[in-house]
Image (cartoon, grey):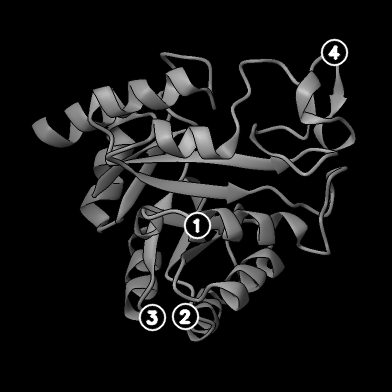
Amino acid sequence: MIVVAHRGASKAEQENTIAAFVRAGEMGAAMVELDVRRTADDAMVVHHDAEVTALGIIAAHPRAILPDYIPDLADALDACEGMQVNVEIKSHLKEPDYDPAQRLAAMVVELLLSRSDQDRMLISSFDLDTLVAVRSLAPQLRTGFLYTRPKPDPEAMFAELRRAGHEAIHPYHLGVNGTLVEQAHAAGLQVNTWTVDDPDRIVELRDWGVDAVITNVPDIALSTIATR
């Protein structure tokens, strides 16, 4: 099981910042998870929420007036050198920057294809249409479907995801058990679960065969895996 630093080493540094990504690498994380959104002038920036405190919706403002701590996606990817990167494309029906035209997906794909390190990238999203758009533009990029609540027929969903070419599921960890891991693996999908900071739960997930655990405390997760 590999350890994925959730928004970087986000307990040690401000989340989704260059400092958090660099610290994750120093701690030994194999992968970093980060969030990308689009600005009004089509810059790609790394931030979890659709809004910035005291400013408002990111998609309604130009890049130049965003706080300095918010990095551009390209700079964030560079800061994660030596690690894999899970780029979560933020596009949710209930959020103010929902992107049904998939402009952000196309921009992310264009950037990744322009780089020589695209093999270390994994694209995830809660919006399945976003992942479909990514695969239609660049089927060579790895994709994983994010979800929160357990599904009524997971085996059918897993089979459909794999037929569509996706490589992973990213379920919330409280919906994960040994049976789900077995079903996903039987369908040919990796299981990368979020967000887990409790050492006992990390061990349990590892013993079920989970492929990756996404955590705010990569140092603690790595120590737990090594010693238990």
Q: Would you identify the image quadrant in which residue 109 lies?
A: bottom right
Can residue 16 be seen here? The reply is: yes
10 Å crowding of disc 4: few (<14), some (14-19), many (20+): few
Q: Label for residue 187?
A: 3
Front tag of 2 and 4: 4
- Mark closer to the chain start, 1 or 2: 1
Dividing the image into 4 quarters, which one contains the C terminus? top left
- Mark closer to the chain start, 2 or 4: 4
Query: Does the residue at mark 2 contact the one at mark 3 (Cβ under 8 Å)?
Result: yes
Residue 112: horizontal and vertical position, in percent? 51, 55
SS label for mark 2: helix
Structural distance between the alpha carbons of marks 1 and 3: 31 Å
**Which residue does the numbered mark 4 point to in the structure image?**
54
SS label for mark 1: loop
Query: Does the residue at mark 4 contact the one at mark 3 (Cβ under 8 Å)?
Result: no
- Mark closer to the chain start, 1 or 3: 1
Structural distance between the alpha carbons of marks 1 and 2: 26 Å
Amino acid at circle 1: Ser
Amino acid at circle 4: Ala
Left or right of residue 198, residue 169 in this image: right
Residue 201: horizontal and vertical position, in percent? 33, 38
Structural distance between the alpha carbons of marks 4 and 3: 46 Å
Q: In the image, what residue occupies the spot 35% across and 77% down?
A: 188
Q: Label for residue 162?
A: 2
